[in-house]
Image (cartoon, grey):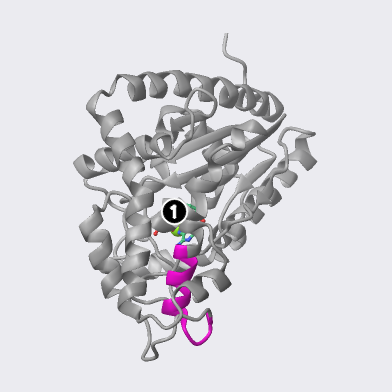
């Protein structure tokens, strides 16, 4: 069976974009693949975290993975920091990644412009750690958004470089783009993607938002000066984004959505989108609350899965040590 690897940074709160673009598509992949889903908390350290909030966010993401339908008995869901092989292979791959390659990364350029007071070495070598995440599990497939494409290219290059020197050690992973790969845009600036690190809370629907908050945010969403619900990303990015969200959530095509709101104003339309999203999140919220009330199940899954992940990761790490000529433990 093929192996699939994916994860999210444990920075902040998951958004509707993360849900529609990633999480929702991960569910049921375990029917066809051996799946590993990480909560990538080591990656989050490239930005300063408040320890209390950080722990809360990371645990919440784990719970949200499960509440969204990932089955921790069939998928390996774990915290990156619980498997020390990530940091260990990360260092080794640092030594096989060139400064010139890392210099070209647009995420490094964007993030260092945004955090000019904290351009740390971790932010720069991020792609080497991400390569380790994937290669440790000999992943064949990595579902990612377009924003992560450059990083996956480095991962493949580094793996090939290593294999060329030491023989077949790593599986070379392929990017995997789920069919419904909707790219959800910001509600405030619909030409920018919705992102959990956006400072404008009205731009983003968080998965923890309640019904009233969701409806209020959709009511405020930026549209245009026309009054026609028509799909036209170029000229009507705000309306088109709302149509896409509505379409994914209610399983309708853009034509069907346009017909449904023919002759209706933006007010009615936005309310309908808000209600559809809130309806979709109702059972998700109920499941989250249930899992949080009694933490036994989640805690048990965290323990079991970190051991399982470590077993696979250490197998690869031992192989790497041997190939490199590091002295065996006695
Ligand atoms: P950050 O701002 O911290 O980078 P993010 O919202 O971009 O946060 P990531 O942890 O970088 O989240 O990405 C997690 C997953 O969610 C990735 O697979 C990414 O492609 C997907 N994703 C992120 N934002 C969107 C979006 N607006 N629409 C669809 N998919 C998205
Ligand atoms: Mg991102």
Horizontal side of residue 184 vs 279, given as left or right: right
Query: Where the N terminus falls, by quadrant?
Result: top right
Query: For numbered disc 1, what is the local secondary structure?
Result: helix
Q: Do we see residue 89 in this rendering?
A: yes
Residue 106 pos. (x, y %): 52, 67
Which stretch is magenta?
232-246
Classify 191 as above or below 38: below
Residue 323 pos. (x, y %): 71, 28
Which residue ends up furthest to the bottom in the rendered image?
225
Horizontal side of residue 191 vs 319, given as left or right: left
Q: Which residue is denoted by mark 1 in the rendering? A: 18
Residue 57 pos. (x, y %): 29, 43
Q: In which quarter of the image is residue 219?
A: bottom left
Q: Residue at x 35, y 82 (%)?
A: 265
Horizontal side of residue 185 vs 102, given as left or right: left
Residue 239 falls within the magenta-colored stretch: yes
Mark 1 packing: few (<14 Cα in 10 Å), some, or many (20+)?
Answer: many
Classify 26 as above or below 308: below
Q: Is the magenta stretch mostly helix, strand or loop?
A: helix
Q: Quadrant of residue 10?
A: top left
Q: Residue at x 50, y 59 (%)?
A: 248
Q: Do we see residue 200 in this rendering?
A: no
Q: How many marks do you count on the picture? A: 1
Residue 212 falls within the magenta-colored stretch: no
Horizontal side of residue 128 vs 59, given as left or right: right
């Amino acid at each position: 069976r093929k192996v699939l690897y994916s994860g999210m940074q444990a920075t902040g709160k998951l958004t509707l974009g993360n849900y529609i673009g990633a999480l929702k598509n991960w569910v049921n992949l375990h029917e066809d693949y051996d799946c590993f889903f990480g909560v990538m908390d080591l990656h989050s350290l490239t930005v300063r975290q408040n320890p209390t909030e950080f722990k809360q966010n990371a645990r919440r993401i784990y719970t949200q993975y499960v509440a969204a339908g990932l089955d921790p008995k069939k998928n390996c869901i774990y915290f990156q920091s619980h498997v020390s092989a990530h940091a260990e292979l990360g260092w080794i791959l640092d030594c096989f990644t060139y400064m010139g390659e890392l210099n070209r990364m647009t995420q490094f350029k964007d993030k260092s412009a945004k955090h000019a007071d904290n351009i740390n070495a971790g932010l720069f070598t991020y792609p080497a750690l991400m390569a380790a995440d994937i290669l440790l599990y000999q992943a064949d497939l990595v579902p990612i958004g377009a924003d992560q494409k450059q990083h996956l290219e480095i991962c493949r290059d580094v793996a090939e470089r290593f294999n060329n020197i030491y023989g077949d050690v790593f599986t070379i992973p392929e990017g995997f783009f789920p069919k419904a790969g909707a790219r959800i845009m910001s509600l405030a600036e619909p030409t920018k993607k919705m992102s959990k690190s956006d400072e404008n809370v009205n731009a983003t629907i968080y998965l923890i938002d309640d019904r009233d908050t969701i409806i209020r945010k959709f009511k405020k969403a930026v549209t245009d000066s026309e009054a026609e619900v028509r799909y036209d990303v170029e000229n009507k990015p705000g309306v088109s984004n709302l149509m896409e969200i509505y379409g994914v959530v209610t399983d309708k095509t853009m034509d069907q959505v346009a017909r449904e709101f023919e002759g209706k104003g933006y007010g009615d339309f936005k309310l309908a989108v808000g209600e559809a999203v809130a309806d979709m999140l109702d059972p998700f919220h109920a499941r989250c609350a249930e899992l949080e009330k009694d933490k036994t199940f989640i805690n048990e899954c965290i323990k079991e899965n970190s051991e399982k992940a470590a077993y696979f990761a250490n197998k690869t790490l031992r192989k790497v040590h041997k190939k490199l000529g590091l002295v065996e433990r006695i």
